[in-house]
Image (cartoon, rainbow, N blue to C red):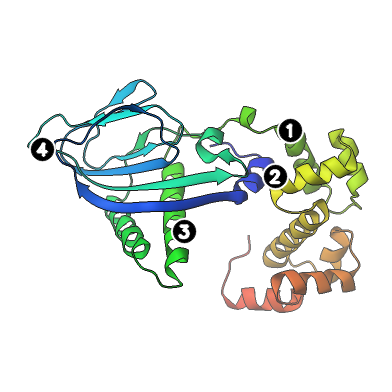
Amino acid sequence: MQQTTFWKNYMTNAQLDLSIARYTKVPATWAEDSYVPEFNKLYFIMEGEGFVKVNGETYYPKPGELYLLPAGSTQAYGTLNDHNTFGKYWCHFSSKVNDAHLFQIIQAPVFITPCDPELLIHKFKQLILHSEKGDLSSGFRVHSTLFGIMADFIEQSSEVHFDSRTVPSFEKMDKILQYIESHLHDSLSVEDLARIASFHPNYFISVFKKYTGLSPIQFINRQRMERAKHLLLFTEQSVTGIADSLGMEVSYFSRMFREQIGFSPKNYREMISRTGVTKN
């Protein structure tokens, strides 16, 4: 899946919310003719026969296949053999990026064959377990597991792509983010960036925050610190040299690095070096 600077940052705003997760041996009466759900569904088929239909195309899932049925698509499903119905792990969940459905933005295949089915079974069991718990940590466990399943689905598919038509101002914002990435050493003002995008500065700030979750200045500083982390890890540049390469006074750079990363640049480099990270 080709990723631009824009998409990498835009997708950090993705939200997944689980409503239910179960394992079910479906009854012979399991059927729906044609409907459009407002939630996404995952079916991991373990046994049996049946069919699902998505936007007019019919599929006959086999054991070991993971199906993604996205919100907003016209769906139908049913059994083929009353004595050999589906046994499946499944869940329903919502997915949004800002105000849009995730799978309006990401065009994904209907199914994949997971590389590690045993690991996926474990993840579904964890999803079910923690979704039924009411303790404080269970919500975090559910979110991390669901994100993990969807990350695996996307990584193991060769057919996933972004639909830029669903995101207004995509081309302008991608241009801006690429410009920032290649000019981190320069003094970047909101007015200059807004001019590049042909937006009024106030409107530019609003659009930028909508797509990145940060103000332009916050985003620029975050990218500078990410660049600094890379340089501290993979080069022998001095802290002063790294600050200079980012167009920052060393004292200001060191203070910002500590505020955002939690360590001074020197301590960060020493800590990472002790972990045995290879520089190349």
Q: Secondary structure at mark 1?
A: loop
Q: CA distance from mark 2 to mark 4?
A: 47 Å
**Of label 3 and label 4, which has the lower sequence position?**
4
Relative placement, left or right, of 271 versus 54 is right
Element type at marker 3?
Answer: helix
Residue depicted at 70% across the width and 52% down the height = 213
| Mark seen at residue 211 | 2
Which of the two labelled residues, at mark 1 and mark 3, occupies the earlier sequence position?
A: 3
| Helix, strand or loop at mark 2 | helix
Of pointers 1 and 4, the one earlier in the residue sequence: 4
Q: How far is mark 3 from mark 2, CA to CA? A: 21 Å
At x 58% / y 69%, what residue is drawn?
A: 277
Which residue is the site of mark 3? 143
- Asked if the residue at tag 1 contacts the one at tag 2, i.e. Cβ–Cβ closer than 8 Å, the answer is yes
Pinpoint residue 160: horizontal percent, then vertical percent: 49, 34
Would you say the residues marked 3 and 4 are in contact, meaning their CB atoms lie under 8 Å apart?
no
Apparent side of residue 59 relative to residue 95 in the rendered image (left or right): left
Q: What's the residue type where badge 4 is placed?
A: Asn
Badge 4 element:
loop
State yes or no: discs 3 and 2 in contact (Cβ < 8 Å): no
Kind of residue at badge 1? Ser
Picture residue at 63% right of the left edge, 41% below the top:
7
* Mark 1 vs 3: CB contact within 8 A: no
Which image quarter: residue 254? bottom right
Sort mark 3 into few (<14), some (14-19) or many (20+) by Cα contacts within 10 Å. Answer: some
Which x, y percent locates residue 263?
A: 71, 77
Amino acid on which disc 2 is placed: Tyr
Amino acid residing under circle 3? His
Q: Which of pointers 2 and 4 lies earlier in the amino acid sequence? A: 4
Residue designated by label 4: 84
Q: Nearer the viewer, residue 142 or 39?
A: 39
Residue beneath label 1, please?
A: 169
